[in-house]
Image (cartoon, rainbow, N blue to C red):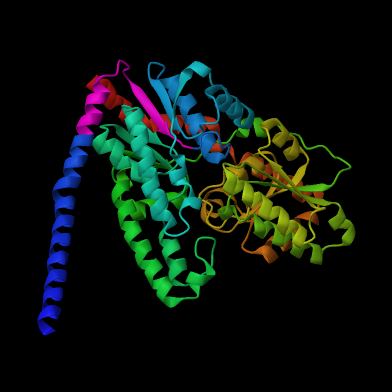
Amino acid sequence: MFCCLWKSVVMWLVFLFYSILALLLLSIIVLPLSVLLFKYYVSKKRKSYNVLKTVAFFHPYCNAGGGGERVLWTAVLALHQKYPDYKIYIYTGDVDASPSEIIKRAHQRFNIVLPDQVINFVYLYRRKFVEASLYPYFTLLGQSIGSMILGVEALLSFQPDIYIDTMGYAFTYPLFSYIGGSKVACYIHYPTITKEMLTRVARRVITHNNSQRVANNPILTSFKLFYYKVFALLYSHVGKYSDIIMVNSSWTEEHVIQLWNCQLKTYKLYPPCDTEDLKKITHSKTDGPVKIISVAQFRPEKDHPLQLRAMYQLRQIISEELWDNLKLIFIGSTRNEEDEVCVKDMQDLCKHLSLENNVEFKVNLPYEDMKKEFSEGLIGLHAMWNEHFGIGIVECMAAGLIMIAHKSGGPKMDIVIEDPETCRNGFLACDEVEYAQTIKLILHLSQDTKTRISQNAVSSVDRFSMEEFKNGFLTFTQPLFKVMKKSS
């Protein structure tokens, strides 16, 4: 019996030895050899192109209609005007939309006009691999690996001279830099992971990306913290493959430099807002309700439920007459079925809180209709914790709305000035009670005070204009185009 047991142990040890040996061979020989073969194949395919001077934007959701898409289209317009001899490509997963439909939507949503012949679309059919819904667990890692799968599809479809990621898919940078031989630039709206996310997990705070089950279990919390730390190391490594790093706010800049340690090639560039057009909006007195306008994509992190809870709190502290004359208008776009579910959940929460008579949802609203809502609004509302920047906030302020944003991230560091002694241009709040109290305060301000805050808001947004963005984008990316001129 002892002899049989010993044979079993030896067999398992031998099996373990060969398994480890196989893994070592895979990591030391097979994997690097596969990468080199893939690199050779891509290089050979690239030489077969007749097209010279190409720049490609990686933006799988280019038809979504959010702030990130405004960055994309403004950057495309700037490059086309500056470098008309370059062919511009866009990697997109919007396979259900034709090029003309995508360009038409960009015009309707952002008032940006692009000739059809300027852009070449490269359609990607594996966008599902970057959908969060595909990864109920290990979402960050799953989406990052998914972005590499999508990146491989993009690279096999077309290899550009210059690759610009405008959605923050950092795990694609080594693919295009090392294998594709492209110069790489990126525009980061929000770091995939931050030190604050690690802190919240360590403190066992319940959030949309840290469930109650994990937060209440010390073992699961420790495991998730370890996973986050490993992912942060991987994220910091791939980020270094970008030659030029542009970030959209002081908050994002601070976190990217902390994670990637690339201070010398990191530049702060506020995202573009159509401030000039929005500043022309005139507010006329109407007999309709007092409108509170909320502009943000319908995604969980935007925390629309906080705004609904704030309205519920507000109802408790203002008169019934004032409440009956109040309406919250949600304006935002949806990218996919997951976002549409988010809207449905919000509508259900409205009914649960008995707010349906005071709340409206306007999904994928055209630009001109949004301007009309702005002209009838008094207050702007935004509730995302640690919002990276907040284009919707700037749009509301440019239109003369009195803004209430979350006291964190970009709104606190770059946009909203609360000091009443100087030139207050808005308000900041942390929870539903503070939001409700601030709305009540604004409703009871004198007309002169409302006008002064509104004027301060309008005059403070020039630094976020489209022209400022275009000039900055061209300045920061210029070294990439200089290199291309020398090599050609």
Task: Give above or below for 450 relative to 160.
Answer: below
**Residue 421 visible in the shown view:** no
- Per the image, is 245 magenta? no
Report the residue at 42% width, 25% height from top: 89
The C terminus - image quarter: top left
Residue 109, image x, y percentages: 62, 32
Query: What x and y, as percent, mark residue 95?
Result: 51, 31
Front in this rendered view, residue 283 or 127: 127
In the picture, the quarter occupied by the N terminus is: bottom left
Residue sitting at the far left: 3
- Name the outermost residue toward the bottom: 2
Task: Give the residues in magenta.
Answer: 39-60
**Spot occupied by residue 392 in the image (x, y as percentages of width and height):** 61, 43
Q: Quadrant of residue 111?
A: top right
Residue 94 versus residue 424 in the image, above or below: above
Position above or below: 30 against 1: above
Q: Is residue 53 magenta?
A: yes
User: Is there any visible trace of residue 157 in the rendered image?
Assistant: yes
